[in-house]
Image (spheres, helix red, strand yellow):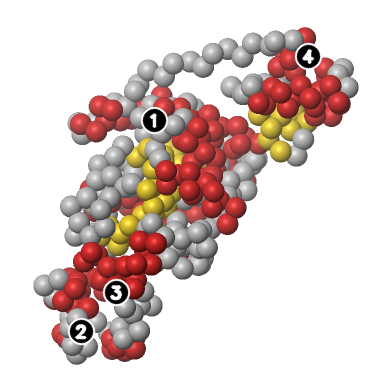
Amino acid sequence: MAFVKSNIYFHCFNLIEGFTSSCFKKISNYFPSIETAWKADIYEFKKAKLSDSLIEKIKNKIKKIDPELELEKLKKQKIDIITISDKNYPELLKQIYDPPFILYIKGTLKKQELCLAIVGTRKLTFYGKQITPLISYDLAKSGFTIVSGMARGIDTLAHKSALKAKTRTIAVLGSGIDGKSIYPPENRKLAEEIAENGAVISEYPPGTSALAYHFPQRNRIISGLSYGVLVIEAPLKSGALITAKTALDQNREIFAIPGSVLWENSQGPNYLIKKGAKLVQDINDILEEFALKSDPIFRNIKYKISNKEEIKPESREEELILKYTDNPIHIDKLARKTKLSINVLSSNLSLMEIKGKIKNLGGGYYVKTK
């Protein structure tokens, strides 16, 4: 994506605290261009109907910001900018009530793309660890670009599953996208992988920390980029439910994976289903929702998903392990069931994990790869 030099002035205004999308709208309506606004007399901003307090901030900050220096900083960090006035700005995102006027990008963001958002709790259960990779991988293979927030838990698994499927995925952050600002920090490597085959984006400038109030704001972008939102494991009070509410306001499709009424993490999806969200047992429940839509982009969906090859044991030990791992099981219990020593069991589990037959869920629990 070629860097449009005039976009640097959007960035410079975005560096001023309190400069929101509505402020961008006001100066865009008054000034002939964003560059003209940057170079205008400070008193012109009053005619653009900006508040006195913001004008004072602009007055104090504008002298300290060097557009040319800022341009070099972004280029050095390999960060691109797209603004709402650019022809390549995502069409679907542009339709929402409050689209971001500026987006910072590492990777490639497309004007039109078949996106589906997958969101959920950071504190996922074994159920979440099982279902998220399965459904995310199959959705990616079916033609969807997976969009999520790169948070711990469900988000991270959704992105990793898309990468495993060798398809595009988009991470929308509530912080800057520069290396030092990436949140959570343990996902910096993941962000690099996503940027290589997708995009890491944010409306916040480089150097912006991940503050609590940023996340509800970024959620409107996650749903705004997507034709639908799938919620996997989320308490009633969670960011995932905020994303679902935002998606509903944006007239997007809402999907949810049900769970036990006894689990806190299933209260969110179960509530959404009760309120009319589409119950999802497998990806066909999602695909059929788009089957009759007239938009040509839905023709890219691959509706026939080939079944994965049956997992076949290569030894007596593997046969015993596969027999008892249809559901998550602790290694101690598995040892009792299979009557294999812990040493023999551990070595076989490690080999089977490498072969893709067994998944390590953490905490000593294992499950067969479905």
Q: Residue at x 40, y 40 (%)?
A: 197
Mark 3: few, some, or many residues within 10 Å (few <14, many ≥20)? many
Give how far across and how far down residue 138 sits, in percent: 45, 27
Estimate the spatial distance between the alpha carbons at disc 1 and disc 4, rounded to whole Å: 38 Å
On residue 67, which mark appears? 3
Q: CA distance from mark 1 to mark 2?
A: 48 Å
CB under 8 Å between discs 3 and 2:
no
Q: Position of residue 73 (x, y in %)?
A: 38, 67
Identity of the residue drawn at 27% across and 68% down: 8
Q: CA distance from mark 3 to mark 1?
A: 46 Å
Q: CA distance from mark 3 to mark 2?
A: 19 Å
Q: Which residue is mark 4?
A: 317
Dot 1: element? helix
Q: Give the amino acid type for the residue marked by disc 2 in the picture.
A: Phe
Q: Would you identify the image quadrant in which residue 337 lies? A: top right
- How far apart are labels 4 and 3 at the CA level? 65 Å
